[in-house]
Amino acid sequence: MRTLLSGALILLVCACARADSVRFRPIDVYVDSGKEPLAAYQVEITATNARIAGVEGGETGAFADPPHYDPAALQGGRIILAAFNTGIDLPRGRTRVATLHMEEDGAAEYQIRITAAATADGKRIQAKASLEPRQGDLR
């Protein structure tokens, strides 16, 4: 009985220690289309020591709605986001297209790769993608 209680106590201490190291942080996703109007994009984001807890849209306007993604990706550290808008008020330059809500466990690292970007008429454009973690621990 004493061994069983000792084991349970060790598990409880480990669980509390892990809960202390976990924090939630929003990560903003940006696409920079330069001088071209951005109508469509697709990016791949990978994370180590982090799990995707949620996805929301970007700045108001063309990409205010959440982008398309596979909901199963929320269980891992890799997600592909994609969105398009053929409206007339398309952003140019650096635009926040989405925000990821991450559950970080320790020192999280993120990478982003843009796989497609286009104008409303389907013309492929050279664009850059970047991630910007917000500061603070939002438990």
Image: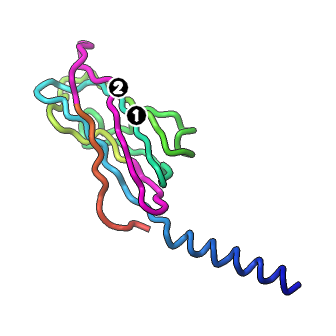
Residue 25 shown in magenta? no
The colour style of the image is rainbow
The crowding category of the residue bearing disc 2, from other C-alpha atoms within 10 Å (few below 14, some 14 to 19, many at least 20), is some
The crowding category of the residue bearing disc 1, from other C-alpha atoms within 10 Å (few below 14, some 14 to 19, many at least 20), is some
User: What whole-number distance in Å separates the C-alpha atoms at marks 1 and 2?
Assistant: 7 Å
Q: Is residue 129 left or right of residue 46?
A: left
Q: Which mark is residue 92?
A: none
Please name the predominant secondary structure of the magenta segment in the image: strand
Instruction: From this view, report whether residue 52 is shown above or below residue 136.
Output: above
Name the outermost residue toward the right: 1
- Picture quadrant of residue 14: bottom right
Counting from the top left corner in percent of width and height, residue 109 is at 39, 51
Q: Which mark is residue 44?
A: 1
Q: Which mark is residue 115?
A: 2
Q: Are marks 1 and 2 in contact (CB under 8 Å)?
A: yes
Counting from the top left corner in percent of width and height, residue 111 is at 36, 42
Counting from the top left corner in percent of width and height, residue 3 is at 84, 82
At 46% from the left and 38% from the top, the residue drawn is 79
Q: Give the magenta range.
A: 100-127
Q: Is residue 74 left or right of residue 5?
A: left
At mark 1, the secondary structure is strand
At 38% from the left and 47% from the top, the residue drawn is 110
Instruction: From this view, report whether residue 88 is shown above or below residue 66.
Output: above
Screen quadrant of the C terminus: bottom left
Q: Is residue 67 left or right of residue 8?
A: left
The three-letter code of the residue at mark 1 reads Glu
